[in-house]
Protein backbone atom coordinates (compact mmCIF):
# COMPACT_ATOMS: atom_id res chain seq x y z
CA UNK A 1 0.00 0.00 0.00
CA UNK A 2 1.33 3.44 -0.90
CA UNK A 3 0.98 5.22 2.42
CA UNK A 4 1.07 8.92 3.32
CA UNK A 5 -1.51 9.43 6.07
CA UNK A 6 -5.04 8.77 7.18
CA UNK A 7 -6.34 8.09 3.66
CA UNK A 8 -3.85 5.23 3.33
CA UNK A 9 -5.24 3.62 6.49
CA UNK A 10 -8.74 3.90 5.01
CA UNK A 11 -7.77 2.48 1.62
CA UNK A 12 -6.18 -0.49 3.37
CA UNK A 13 -9.14 -1.31 5.63
CA UNK A 14 -12.50 -0.37 4.09
CA UNK A 15 -12.29 -2.69 1.05
CA UNK A 16 -11.67 -5.71 3.30
CA UNK A 17 -14.61 -4.79 5.53
CA UNK A 18 -16.85 -4.40 2.45
CA UNK A 19 -15.71 -7.75 1.08
CA UNK A 20 -16.64 -9.38 4.39
CA UNK A 21 -20.18 -8.02 3.85
CA UNK A 22 -20.31 -9.72 0.47
CA UNK A 23 -19.40 -6.78 -1.78
CA UNK A 24 -17.30 -7.82 -4.78
CA UNK A 25 -14.53 -5.23 -4.44
CA UNK A 26 -11.73 -4.46 -6.89
CA UNK A 27 -9.07 -1.82 -6.22
CA UNK A 28 -7.42 0.33 -8.87
CA UNK A 29 -4.23 2.27 -8.25
CA UNK A 30 -1.15 3.50 -10.09
CA UNK A 31 1.56 0.94 -10.66
CA UNK A 32 3.96 2.43 -8.12
CA UNK A 33 7.20 0.49 -7.67
CA UNK A 34 6.19 -0.74 -4.23
CA UNK A 35 2.77 -1.88 -5.47
CA UNK A 36 4.29 -3.77 -8.41
CA UNK A 37 6.66 -5.48 -5.97
CA UNK A 38 4.08 -6.39 -3.35
CA UNK A 39 0.91 -7.30 -5.27
CA UNK A 40 0.77 -11.05 -5.77
CA UNK A 41 0.01 -13.12 -8.89
CA UNK A 42 -0.03 -10.18 -11.33
CA UNK A 43 -1.44 -10.88 -14.79
CA UNK A 44 -2.17 -8.68 -17.77
CA UNK A 45 -5.97 -8.24 -17.87
CA UNK A 46 -6.16 -5.55 -20.51
CA UNK A 47 -4.20 -3.21 -22.75
CA UNK A 48 -5.35 0.29 -23.69
CA UNK A 49 -3.82 1.43 -26.98
CA UNK A 50 -3.60 5.15 -26.09
CA UNK A 51 -4.16 6.93 -22.78
CA UNK A 52 -3.34 10.65 -23.11
CA UNK A 53 -0.46 9.79 -25.45
CA UNK A 54 0.86 6.80 -23.45
CA UNK A 55 0.75 3.82 -25.78
CA UNK A 56 -0.24 0.22 -25.05
CA UNK A 57 -0.94 0.80 -21.38
CA UNK A 58 -1.12 -2.54 -19.60
CA UNK A 59 -3.56 -3.22 -16.76
CA UNK A 60 -1.96 -5.68 -14.36
CA UNK A 61 -4.33 -7.44 -11.99
CA UNK A 62 -3.38 -9.47 -8.93
CA UNK A 63 -4.19 -9.87 -5.25
CA UNK A 64 -3.34 -7.60 -2.32
CA UNK A 65 -0.79 -9.27 -0.06
CA UNK A 66 -2.73 -8.71 3.19
CA UNK A 67 -6.40 -9.28 2.40
CA UNK A 68 -6.16 -11.12 -0.94
CA UNK A 69 -8.51 -8.68 -2.72
CA UNK A 70 -8.30 -8.19 -6.49
CA UNK A 71 -6.30 -5.10 -7.39
CA UNK A 72 -5.52 -3.60 -10.82
CA UNK A 73 -2.37 -1.55 -11.35
CA UNK A 74 -1.82 0.90 -14.19
CA UNK A 75 1.54 -0.10 -15.60
CA UNK A 76 3.34 2.99 -16.90
CA UNK A 77 6.85 2.90 -15.40
CA UNK A 78 7.90 6.28 -16.82
CA UNK A 79 4.97 7.90 -15.00
CA UNK A 80 4.68 5.95 -11.75
CA UNK A 81 8.12 4.37 -11.19
CA UNK A 82 10.47 7.28 -11.70
CA UNK A 83 12.20 7.07 -8.33
CA UNK A 84 10.24 9.88 -6.64
CA UNK A 85 7.38 9.48 -4.20
CA UNK A 86 3.73 10.37 -4.50
CA UNK A 87 4.25 14.12 -4.19
CA UNK A 88 7.98 14.60 -4.86
CA UNK A 89 10.32 13.97 -7.77
CA UNK A 90 13.37 11.76 -7.27
CA UNK A 91 15.47 14.90 -6.58
CA UNK A 92 13.11 16.07 -3.79
CA UNK A 93 11.49 18.88 -5.78
CA UNK A 94 7.70 19.17 -6.01
CA UNK A 95 6.19 17.19 -8.84
CA UNK A 96 4.96 19.20 -11.79
CA UNK A 97 3.19 16.32 -13.56
CA UNK A 98 0.64 15.21 -10.97
CA UNK A 99 -2.22 16.39 -13.18
CA UNK A 100 -1.06 13.92 -15.84
CA UNK A 101 -0.35 11.12 -13.34
CA UNK A 102 -3.87 11.27 -11.89
CA UNK A 103 -5.67 12.14 -15.12
CA UNK A 104 -4.17 8.97 -16.63
CA UNK A 105 -5.28 7.00 -13.56
CA UNK A 106 -8.79 8.44 -13.94
CA UNK A 107 -9.02 7.64 -17.66
CA UNK A 108 -7.86 4.06 -17.05
CA UNK A 109 -10.25 3.59 -14.10
CA UNK A 110 -13.08 4.86 -16.32
CA UNK A 111 -12.15 2.35 -19.02
CA UNK A 112 -12.06 -0.48 -16.48
CA UNK A 113 -15.41 0.62 -15.02
CA UNK A 114 -17.02 0.54 -18.46
CA UNK A 115 -15.70 -2.94 -19.19
CA UNK A 116 -13.43 -1.74 -21.98
CA UNK A 117 -10.43 -3.67 -20.65
CA UNK A 118 -12.20 -6.75 -19.35
CA UNK A 119 -15.88 -7.10 -20.18
CA UNK A 120 -16.24 -10.01 -17.74
CA UNK A 121 -16.14 -7.64 -14.76
CA UNK A 122 -18.17 -4.44 -14.79
CA UNK A 123 -18.92 -2.72 -11.46
CA UNK A 124 -22.24 -1.21 -10.34
CA UNK A 125 -20.47 1.45 -8.30
CA UNK A 126 -17.16 3.28 -8.66
CA UNK A 127 -16.03 4.66 -5.30
CA UNK A 128 -13.47 7.47 -5.79
CA UNK A 129 -11.29 8.94 -3.06
CA UNK A 130 -9.95 12.51 -2.96
CA UNK A 131 -8.83 14.83 -5.75
CA UNK A 132 -6.59 12.23 -7.41
CA UNK A 133 -9.73 10.47 -8.63
CA UNK A 134 -11.90 13.57 -9.08
CA UNK A 135 -11.99 13.30 -12.88
CA UNK A 136 -13.57 9.82 -12.82
CA UNK A 137 -17.18 10.95 -12.16
CA UNK A 138 -16.78 13.57 -14.91
CA UNK A 139 -15.35 11.09 -17.41
CA UNK A 140 -17.97 8.45 -16.63
CA UNK A 141 -20.74 11.03 -16.99
CA UNK A 142 -19.28 11.99 -20.35
CA UNK A 143 -18.75 8.45 -21.66
CA UNK A 144 -21.87 6.69 -20.41
CA UNK A 145 -24.24 9.23 -18.85
CA UNK A 146 -26.82 7.45 -16.71
CA UNK A 147 -26.05 4.09 -18.34
CA UNK A 148 -22.65 3.67 -16.68
CA UNK A 149 -21.92 2.68 -13.10
CA UNK A 150 -22.95 5.11 -10.36
CA UNK A 151 -20.21 7.05 -8.59
CA UNK A 152 -19.47 7.83 -4.96
CA UNK A 153 -16.90 10.55 -4.40
CA UNK A 154 -15.36 10.73 -0.92
CA UNK A 155 -13.48 13.80 0.22
CA UNK A 156 -10.98 13.16 2.97
CA UNK A 157 -9.61 16.72 3.22
CA UNK A 158 -10.98 19.84 1.54
CA UNK A 159 -7.58 21.55 1.73
CA UNK A 160 -6.02 19.33 -0.93
CA UNK A 161 -7.77 20.04 -4.22
CA UNK A 162 -5.48 19.15 -7.12
CA UNK A 163 -5.64 22.52 -8.86
CA UNK A 164 -3.74 22.97 -12.14
CA UNK A 165 -3.49 25.63 -14.87
CA UNK A 166 -6.49 25.60 -17.20
CA UNK A 167 -4.09 25.49 -20.15
CA UNK A 168 -3.60 21.77 -19.30
CA UNK A 169 -7.25 20.92 -19.92
CA UNK A 170 -6.57 19.40 -23.35
CA UNK A 171 -3.53 17.49 -22.07
CA UNK A 172 -5.66 15.79 -19.42
CA UNK A 173 -8.29 14.79 -21.96
CA UNK A 174 -11.36 16.72 -20.80
CA UNK A 175 -14.16 16.55 -23.40
CA UNK A 176 -15.21 19.89 -24.93
CA UNK A 177 -18.71 19.75 -23.40
CA UNK A 178 -19.27 23.16 -21.68
CA UNK A 179 -21.22 21.65 -18.76
CA UNK A 180 -18.40 19.25 -17.94
CA UNK A 181 -15.77 21.95 -18.23
CA UNK A 182 -17.77 24.31 -16.01
CA UNK A 183 -17.83 21.58 -13.34
CA UNK A 184 -14.03 21.36 -13.44
CA UNK A 185 -13.15 25.05 -13.73
CA UNK A 186 -12.49 27.01 -10.55
CA UNK A 187 -11.14 30.57 -10.72
CA UNK A 188 -9.25 29.93 -13.92
CA UNK A 189 -7.83 26.55 -12.88
CA UNK A 190 -8.73 22.93 -13.47
CA UNK A 191 -9.74 21.77 -9.98
CA UNK A 192 -9.94 17.95 -9.73
CA UNK A 193 -11.66 18.01 -6.34
CA UNK A 194 -14.39 20.29 -7.65
CA UNK A 195 -15.08 17.89 -10.52
CA UNK A 196 -15.51 15.00 -8.08
CA UNK A 197 -17.82 17.07 -5.88
CA UNK A 198 -19.84 18.32 -8.84
CA UNK A 199 -20.30 15.04 -10.71
CA UNK A 200 -20.25 12.31 -8.05
CA UNK A 201 -23.73 10.76 -7.82
CA UNK A 202 -23.20 10.81 -4.06
CA UNK A 203 -20.60 12.81 -2.19
CA UNK A 204 -19.41 11.55 1.14
CA UNK A 205 -16.98 12.77 3.72
CA UNK A 206 -15.47 11.05 6.68
CA UNK A 207 -17.55 12.35 9.58
CA UNK A 208 -21.06 13.80 9.99
CA UNK A 209 -19.77 17.04 11.57
CA UNK A 210 -17.25 17.62 8.75
CA UNK A 211 -20.10 17.16 6.24
CA UNK A 212 -21.79 20.16 7.85
CA UNK A 213 -18.64 22.22 8.32
CA UNK A 214 -17.49 22.05 4.69
CA UNK A 215 -20.61 23.90 3.63
CA UNK A 216 -19.24 27.00 5.41
CA UNK A 217 -16.48 29.41 4.31
CA UNK A 218 -14.36 28.57 7.38
CA UNK A 219 -13.94 24.91 6.39
CA UNK A 220 -14.91 24.77 2.70
CA UNK A 221 -11.59 26.12 1.35
CA UNK A 222 -13.50 28.06 -1.33
CA UNK A 223 -15.62 25.10 -2.46
CA UNK A 224 -18.38 25.58 0.15
CA UNK A 225 -20.83 26.76 -2.53
CA UNK A 226 -20.19 23.66 -4.66
CA UNK A 227 -20.77 21.43 -1.63
CA UNK A 228 -23.88 23.27 -0.50
CA UNK A 229 -25.32 22.82 -4.02
CA UNK A 230 -25.07 19.04 -3.48
CA UNK A 231 -27.20 19.18 -0.34
CA UNK A 232 -29.22 15.97 -0.21
CA UNK A 233 -26.44 14.16 -2.04
CA UNK A 234 -23.90 14.59 0.77
CA UNK A 235 -23.43 12.33 3.78
CA UNK A 236 -20.78 11.94 6.47
CA UNK A 237 -19.70 8.39 7.33
CA UNK A 238 -17.10 8.03 10.06
CA UNK A 239 -13.89 6.22 9.26
CA UNK A 240 -13.21 3.09 11.24
CA UNK A 241 -9.95 1.68 12.50
CA UNK A 242 -8.23 -1.63 11.95
CA UNK A 243 -9.15 -2.89 15.40
CA UNK A 244 -6.95 -5.96 15.08
CA UNK A 245 -3.78 -4.05 14.30
CA UNK A 246 -4.48 -1.20 16.75
CA UNK A 247 -5.06 -3.51 19.68
CA UNK A 248 -3.24 -3.31 23.02
CA UNK A 249 -4.12 -6.96 23.60
CA UNK A 250 -2.38 -8.03 20.38
CA UNK A 251 0.36 -5.51 19.60
CA UNK A 252 3.76 -7.21 19.31
CA UNK A 253 5.61 -4.04 20.27
CA UNK A 254 4.46 -3.56 23.86
CA UNK A 255 6.25 -4.49 27.06
CA UNK A 256 2.97 -5.96 28.22
CA UNK A 257 -0.34 -6.54 26.49
CA UNK A 258 -3.58 -5.41 28.10
CA UNK A 259 -7.28 -4.83 27.48
CA UNK A 260 -10.24 -2.80 28.80
CA UNK A 261 -11.03 -5.59 31.25
CA UNK A 262 -7.47 -6.15 32.39
CA UNK A 263 -5.65 -2.87 32.12
CA UNK A 264 -2.72 -3.71 34.44
CA UNK A 265 -0.21 -4.02 31.61
CA UNK A 266 -0.60 -0.35 30.71
CA UNK A 267 1.46 0.68 33.75
CA UNK A 268 4.29 -1.59 32.55
CA UNK A 269 4.08 0.00 29.09
CA UNK A 270 4.39 3.42 30.70
CA UNK A 271 7.48 2.37 32.65
CA UNK A 272 8.97 0.87 29.52
CA UNK A 273 8.46 3.98 27.37
CA UNK A 274 9.75 6.26 30.15
CA UNK A 275 12.91 4.16 30.28
CA UNK A 276 13.30 4.09 26.48
CA UNK A 277 12.82 7.84 26.08
CA UNK A 278 14.93 8.89 29.07
CA UNK A 279 11.95 10.28 30.97
CA UNK A 280 11.90 10.18 34.78
CA UNK A 281 10.60 6.76 35.88
CA UNK A 282 7.55 7.99 37.71
CA UNK A 283 4.32 6.01 37.57
CA UNK A 284 2.29 8.93 38.95
CA UNK A 285 3.57 11.58 36.49
CA UNK A 286 0.88 12.40 33.90
CA UNK A 287 2.48 11.58 30.53
CA UNK A 288 0.99 13.45 27.56
CA UNK A 289 1.82 12.25 24.06
CA UNK A 290 1.43 13.69 20.56
CA UNK A 291 1.62 11.52 17.42
CA UNK A 292 1.04 13.08 14.03
CA UNK A 293 2.04 15.59 11.42
CA UNK A 294 3.69 18.77 12.71
CA UNK A 295 1.56 21.17 10.70
CA UNK A 296 -0.70 24.18 11.00
CA UNK A 297 -3.74 21.89 10.58
CA UNK A 298 -2.73 19.94 13.69
CA UNK A 299 -2.15 23.20 15.65
CA UNK A 300 1.50 22.24 16.11
CA UNK A 301 2.36 25.97 16.11
CA UNK A 302 0.08 26.43 19.15
CA UNK A 303 1.26 23.24 20.85
CA UNK A 304 4.90 24.31 20.69
CA UNK A 305 3.99 27.24 22.96
CA UNK A 306 1.35 25.56 25.14
CA UNK A 307 3.44 22.49 26.03
CA UNK A 308 6.44 24.26 27.65
CA UNK A 309 4.04 26.49 29.50
CA UNK A 310 2.17 23.43 30.82
CA UNK A 311 5.45 21.75 31.81
CA UNK A 312 6.59 24.87 33.65
CA UNK A 313 3.36 25.11 35.66
CA UNK A 314 3.00 21.38 36.37
CA UNK A 315 6.38 20.13 37.58
CA UNK A 316 5.37 16.45 37.63
CA UNK A 317 4.05 16.38 34.02
CA UNK A 318 5.88 14.76 31.11
CA UNK A 319 5.51 15.08 27.34
CA UNK A 320 6.59 12.81 24.46
CA UNK A 321 6.21 13.66 20.77
CA UNK A 322 6.49 11.53 17.63
CA UNK A 323 5.99 13.43 14.42
CA UNK A 324 7.36 15.15 11.41
CA UNK A 325 6.26 17.96 9.13
CA UNK A 326 7.17 21.62 8.81
CA UNK A 327 10.92 22.01 9.26
CA UNK A 328 10.58 25.16 11.40
CA UNK A 329 8.18 23.40 13.78
CA UNK A 330 10.42 20.33 13.97
CA UNK A 331 13.32 22.62 14.99
CA UNK A 332 11.17 24.52 17.48
CA UNK A 333 10.19 21.26 19.22
CA UNK A 334 13.78 20.00 19.22
CA UNK A 335 14.72 23.30 20.87
CA UNK A 336 12.49 22.53 23.89
CA UNK A 337 14.38 19.48 25.09
CA UNK A 338 17.19 21.23 27.00
CA UNK A 339 14.80 23.14 29.28
CA UNK A 340 13.04 20.05 30.70
CA UNK A 341 15.54 17.25 31.38
CA UNK A 342 13.86 13.91 32.06
CA UNK A 343 10.46 15.36 31.26
CA UNK A 344 10.26 15.79 27.52
CA UNK A 345 11.10 13.60 24.54
CA UNK A 346 11.01 14.82 20.94
CA UNK A 347 11.26 12.14 18.25
CA UNK A 348 11.20 13.57 14.72
CA UNK A 349 10.34 10.63 12.47
CA UNK A 350 7.61 8.20 11.43
CA UNK A 351 7.22 4.82 13.11
CA UNK A 352 4.14 2.67 13.67
CA UNK A 353 6.01 0.70 16.32
CA UNK A 354 6.73 3.85 18.31
CA UNK A 355 3.16 5.06 17.75
CA UNK A 356 1.82 1.88 19.38
CA UNK A 357 4.28 2.21 22.26
CA UNK A 358 3.36 5.85 22.89
CA UNK A 359 -0.38 5.23 22.80
CA UNK A 360 0.18 2.36 25.26
CA UNK A 361 2.54 4.23 27.58
CA UNK A 362 0.77 7.60 27.44
CA UNK A 363 -1.95 8.76 29.84
CA UNK A 364 -3.15 11.67 27.71
CA UNK A 365 -3.11 12.42 23.97
CA UNK A 366 -3.07 16.05 22.87
CA UNK A 367 -4.82 16.42 19.50
CA UNK A 368 -5.57 20.04 18.64
CA UNK A 369 -6.79 20.59 15.10
CA UNK A 370 -7.84 23.67 13.17
CA UNK A 371 -9.97 21.31 11.11
CA UNK A 372 -10.21 17.52 11.21
CA UNK A 373 -12.18 15.55 8.61
CA UNK A 374 -12.22 12.46 10.84
CA UNK A 375 -8.93 11.91 12.63
CA UNK A 376 -7.66 8.46 13.44
CA UNK A 377 -5.06 9.19 16.09
CA UNK A 378 -7.67 9.98 18.76
CA UNK A 379 -9.39 6.66 18.00
CA UNK A 380 -6.13 4.73 18.38
CA UNK A 381 -5.41 6.59 21.62
CA UNK A 382 -8.80 5.70 23.09
CA UNK A 383 -8.32 2.08 22.16
CA UNK A 384 -4.99 2.05 24.01
CA UNK A 385 -6.41 3.89 27.03
CA UNK A 386 -4.73 7.28 26.46
CA UNK A 387 -7.34 9.98 27.04
CA UNK A 388 -7.59 12.52 24.19
CA UNK A 389 -7.72 16.29 24.63
CA UNK A 390 -9.23 17.61 21.38
CA UNK A 391 -10.62 20.68 19.75
CA UNK A 392 -14.14 19.46 18.87
CA UNK A 393 -14.16 19.95 15.11
CA UNK A 394 -15.09 17.43 12.42
CA UNK A 395 -14.59 13.83 13.45
CA UNK A 396 -13.08 14.85 16.78
CA UNK A 397 -16.48 16.25 17.79
CA UNK A 398 -18.18 13.05 16.64
CA UNK A 399 -15.87 10.59 18.40
CA UNK A 400 -14.73 12.15 21.70
CA UNK A 401 -17.33 12.77 24.43
CA UNK A 402 -16.32 15.66 26.69
CA UNK A 403 -15.80 14.98 30.39
CA UNK A 404 -18.59 17.24 31.64
CA UNK A 405 -19.68 16.42 35.21
CA UNK A 406 -22.74 14.58 33.89
CA UNK A 407 -20.80 12.58 31.33
CA UNK A 408 -18.19 11.57 33.90
CA UNK A 409 -20.77 10.38 36.39
CA UNK A 410 -22.80 8.52 33.77
CA UNK A 411 -19.64 6.82 32.45
CA UNK A 412 -19.98 8.17 28.90
CA UNK A 413 -17.06 10.65 28.94
CA UNK A 414 -14.05 9.64 26.84
CA UNK A 415 -11.93 12.81 26.67
CA UNK A 416 -11.71 16.59 26.92
CA UNK A 417 -12.85 19.32 24.54
CA UNK A 418 -11.27 22.77 24.40
CA UNK A 419 -12.64 25.64 22.34
CA UNK A 420 -10.44 28.12 20.51
CA UNK A 421 -7.19 28.00 18.57
CA UNK A 422 -4.74 29.77 20.88
CA UNK A 423 -2.43 28.64 23.69
CA UNK A 424 -4.89 29.70 26.38
CA UNK A 425 -7.56 27.45 24.92
CA UNK A 426 -5.19 24.49 24.70
CA UNK A 427 -3.90 25.20 28.20
CA UNK A 428 -7.47 25.03 29.53
CA UNK A 429 -7.67 21.54 27.99
CA UNK A 430 -4.45 20.47 29.73
CA UNK A 431 -5.67 21.90 33.06
CA UNK A 432 -8.92 19.95 32.97
CA UNK A 433 -7.22 16.70 31.97
CA UNK A 434 -4.49 16.95 34.60
CA UNK A 435 -7.01 17.78 37.34
CA UNK A 436 -9.07 14.69 36.51
CA UNK A 437 -5.96 12.51 36.15
CA UNK A 438 -5.46 12.90 39.90
CA UNK A 439 -8.99 11.57 40.59
CA UNK A 440 -8.28 7.92 40.25
CA UNK A 441 -11.79 6.54 39.98
CA UNK A 442 -13.03 9.12 37.47
CA UNK A 443 -9.90 8.63 35.35
CA UNK A 444 -10.33 4.86 35.26
CA UNK A 445 -13.94 5.37 34.13
CA UNK A 446 -12.88 7.61 31.28
CA UNK A 447 -10.25 5.13 30.21
CA UNK A 448 -12.63 2.21 30.31
CA UNK A 449 -15.29 4.08 28.31
CA UNK A 450 -12.77 5.00 25.60
CA UNK A 451 -11.28 1.52 25.42
CA UNK A 452 -14.77 0.01 25.09
CA UNK A 453 -15.82 2.16 22.10
CA UNK A 454 -16.39 0.26 18.86
CA UNK A 455 -14.77 2.16 16.02
CA UNK A 456 -14.28 -0.92 13.86
CA UNK A 457 -14.72 -0.73 10.08
CA UNK A 458 -17.73 -3.05 10.18
CA UNK A 459 -19.93 -0.16 11.38
CA UNK A 460 -18.82 2.15 8.57
CA UNK A 461 -18.86 -0.58 5.95
CA UNK A 462 -22.55 -1.23 6.69
CA UNK A 463 -23.29 2.45 6.05
CA UNK A 464 -21.38 2.43 2.74
CA UNK A 465 -23.21 -0.73 1.71
CA UNK A 466 -26.57 0.97 2.38
CA UNK A 467 -25.44 3.89 0.23
CA UNK A 468 -24.32 1.62 -2.62
CA UNK A 469 -27.55 -0.38 -2.49
CA UNK A 470 -29.62 2.77 -2.61
CA UNK A 471 -27.66 4.12 -5.61
CA UNK A 472 -27.95 0.85 -7.51
CA UNK A 473 -31.68 0.64 -6.96
CA UNK A 474 -32.13 4.28 -8.03
CA UNK A 475 -30.15 3.52 -11.19
CA UNK A 476 -32.23 0.48 -12.02
CA UNK A 477 -35.49 2.36 -11.37
CA UNK A 478 -34.26 5.09 -13.74
CA UNK A 479 -33.31 2.45 -16.35
CA UNK A 480 -36.74 0.76 -15.99
CA UNK A 481 -38.62 3.98 -16.53
CA UNK A 482 -36.36 4.77 -19.47
CA UNK A 483 -37.03 1.44 -21.17
CA UNK A 484 -40.77 1.81 -20.43
CA UNK A 485 -40.67 5.17 -22.20
CA UNK A 486 -38.73 3.69 -25.11
CA UNK A 487 -41.30 0.87 -25.52
CA UNK A 488 -44.15 3.40 -25.37
P1 LIG B 1 -3.95 12.96 8.89
O1 LIG B 1 -4.46 12.00 7.87
O2 LIG B 1 -4.53 14.34 8.80
O3 LIG B 1 -2.46 12.99 9.00
P2 LIG B 1 -5.17 11.16 10.81
O4 LIG B 1 -5.26 11.21 12.31
O5 LIG B 1 -6.46 10.96 10.09
O6 LIG B 1 -4.44 12.48 10.34
O7 LIG B 1 -4.21 9.98 10.37
C1 LIG B 1 -2.84 10.04 10.56
C2 LIG B 1 -2.28 8.65 10.57
O8 LIG B 1 -0.85 8.71 10.44
C3 LIG B 1 -2.53 7.94 11.84
O9 LIG B 1 -2.49 6.57 11.55
C4 LIG B 1 -1.32 8.39 12.70
O10 LIG B 1 -1.11 7.59 13.80
C5 LIG B 1 -0.24 8.27 11.67
N1 LIG B 1 0.94 9.09 11.90
C6 LIG B 1 1.11 10.41 11.63
N2 LIG B 1 2.36 10.80 11.93
C7 LIG B 1 3.00 9.71 12.40
C8 LIG B 1 4.34 9.45 12.85
N3 LIG B 1 5.25 10.42 12.89
N4 LIG B 1 4.67 8.20 13.22
C9 LIG B 1 3.74 7.22 13.18
N5 LIG B 1 2.47 7.39 12.77
C10 LIG B 1 2.10 8.62 12.38
Image (tube, rainbow, N blue to C red):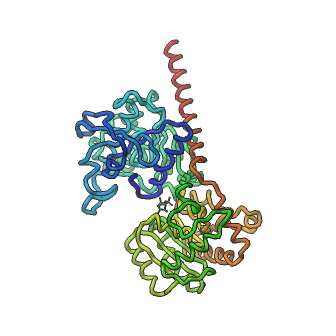
Picture quadrant of residue 62:
top left
Closest to the observer: 404 or 370? 404
In the displayed structure image, the side of residue 14 where residue 71 appears, left or right: left
Q: Could you say where residue 123 lies in the image, as x and y percent from the top left?
A: 45, 33
Picture quadrant of residue 337:
bottom left
Closest to the observer: 123 or 209? 123
Closest to the observer: 357 or 115? 357
Q: Can the viewer see residue 375?
A: no
Picture quadrant of residue 17:
top right
Vertical order, 363 against 26 (above or below): below
Q: Can the viewer see residue 388?
A: yes
The count of marks equals 0
Q: Could you say where residue 280 lies in the image, as x and y percent from the top left?
A: 54, 84
Vertical order, 291 against 14 (above or below): below
Q: Residue at x 37, y 38 (%)?
A: 109
Q: Could you say where residue 340 lies in the image, as x and y percent from the top left?
A: 50, 86
Q: Could you say where residue 353 lies in the image, as x and y percent from the top left?
A: 47, 65
In the displayed structure image, the side of residue 300 where residue 51 appears, left or right: left
In the displayed structure image, the side of residue 329 where residue 175 appears, left or right: left
Which residue is at the far top?
Answer: 488
Amino acid sequence: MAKTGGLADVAASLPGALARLGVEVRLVMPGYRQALDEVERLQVTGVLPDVLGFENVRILTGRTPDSGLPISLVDIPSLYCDGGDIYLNADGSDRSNNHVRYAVLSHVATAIALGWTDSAWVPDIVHCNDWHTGLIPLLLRSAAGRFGPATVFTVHNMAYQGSFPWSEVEAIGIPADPELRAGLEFYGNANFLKAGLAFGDMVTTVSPTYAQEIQTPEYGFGLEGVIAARDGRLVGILNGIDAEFWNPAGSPWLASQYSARNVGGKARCKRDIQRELGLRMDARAPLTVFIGRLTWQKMADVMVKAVPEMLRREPDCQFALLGQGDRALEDAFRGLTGAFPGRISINIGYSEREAHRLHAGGDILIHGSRYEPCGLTQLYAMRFGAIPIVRPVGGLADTVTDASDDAVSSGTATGFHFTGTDEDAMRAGFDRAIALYHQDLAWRRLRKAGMSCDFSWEQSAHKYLELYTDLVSRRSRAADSRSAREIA
